[in-house]
Image: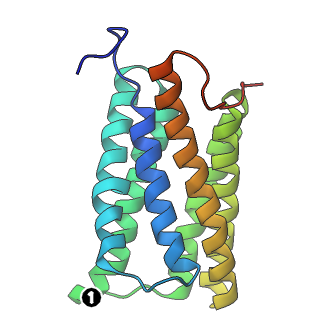
């Protein structure tokens, strides 16, 4: 299938879907709907990790520094997160609450600075990154304190974050296919 305009395809929907669907799935677990399963880990490796890395490289090729940085970084986040969960099961040193909190905390700091970058981008991206900062803050607090109630709150908040990314991805695809705004993304400031 050829691209309607002859221009390169927009890689952002792929990256947003990788992020959004994986975030929703993991946070359904965090909210307490089901235990951590291999479907979550596989999604983290293949869709959250690899597809976002591909989208990030494609963003780099079209000169979008923000998209390249975001997608490759969060792709690496998903791959390392799966590693942190799987490596102890293979005999490597397990994570502690403090080290996991530090891991999530540095991702929260990175996300905060990326959130600042969205001030010149769409409202949809602002909402995704704003809720992502909140999600990392909640998960950091949960890992530092061991408070299971905070994990459940983070789960629901993460479902919102992932759903926003899903909406933004679908909006970009549908808006391009129809050549008009089908689903609004919110104009940049």
Residue shown at the point (67%, 36%) measured from the top left:
118
Q: Quadrant of residue 94?
A: bottom left
Front-lying residue, 79 or 33: 33
Front-lying residue, 140 or 155: 155
Front-lying residue, 179 or 46: 179
Q: Position of residue 70 (x, y in %)?
A: 49, 42
Of all residues, the one furthest to the top in this rendering is 6
Residue shown at the point (28%, 80%) measured from the top left:
87
**Tally of numbered discs:** 1
Q: Position of residue 73 (x, y in %)?
A: 44, 48
Residue 139 shown left or right of residue 81 in the figure: right
Label 1: element kind: helix
Give the crowd class for mark 1: few <14, some 14-19, many >=20 residues within 10 Å: few
Residue shown at the point (47%, 25%) measured from the top left:
64
The residue where tag 1 is placed is 89
* Quadrant of the drawing holding the N terminus: top left
Front-lying residue, 131 or 101: 131
In the image, residue 118 above or below residue 98: above
Please indicate, yes or no, whether residue 147 appears anywhere in the rendered image: no
In the image, residue 139 above or below residue 5: below
Q: Position of residue 161 (x, y in %)?
A: 62, 56
Residue 109 shown left or right of residue 171 in the figure: right
Q: Position of residue 67 (x, y in %)?
A: 48, 34
In the image, residue 119 above or below residue 15: above
């Amino acid at each position: 299938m050829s691209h309607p305009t002859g221009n390169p395809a927009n890689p952002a929907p792929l990256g947003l879907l990788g992020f959004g669907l994986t975030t929703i799935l993991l946070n359904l677990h965090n909210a307490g709907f089901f235990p951590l399963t291999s479907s979550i880990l596989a999604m983290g490796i293949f869709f959250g990790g690899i597809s976002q890395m591909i989208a990030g490289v494609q963003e780099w090729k079209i000169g979008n520094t923000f998209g390249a940085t975001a997608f490759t970084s969060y792709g690496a986040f998903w791959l390392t997160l799966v590693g942190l969960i799987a490596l102890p099961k293979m005999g490597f040193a397990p994570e502690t609450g403090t080290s996991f909190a530090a891991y999530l905390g540095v991702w929260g700091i990175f996300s905060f600075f990326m959130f600042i970058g969205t001030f010149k981008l769409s409202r949809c991206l602002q909402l995704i990154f704003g809720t992502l900062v909140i999600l990392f803050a909640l998960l950091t607090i949960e890992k530092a304190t061991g408070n299971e109630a905070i994990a459940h709150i983070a789960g629901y908040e993460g479902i919102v974050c992932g759903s926003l990314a899903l909406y933004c991805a679908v909006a970009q695809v549908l808006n391009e296919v129809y050549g008009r705004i089908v689903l609004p993304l919110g104009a940049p400031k």
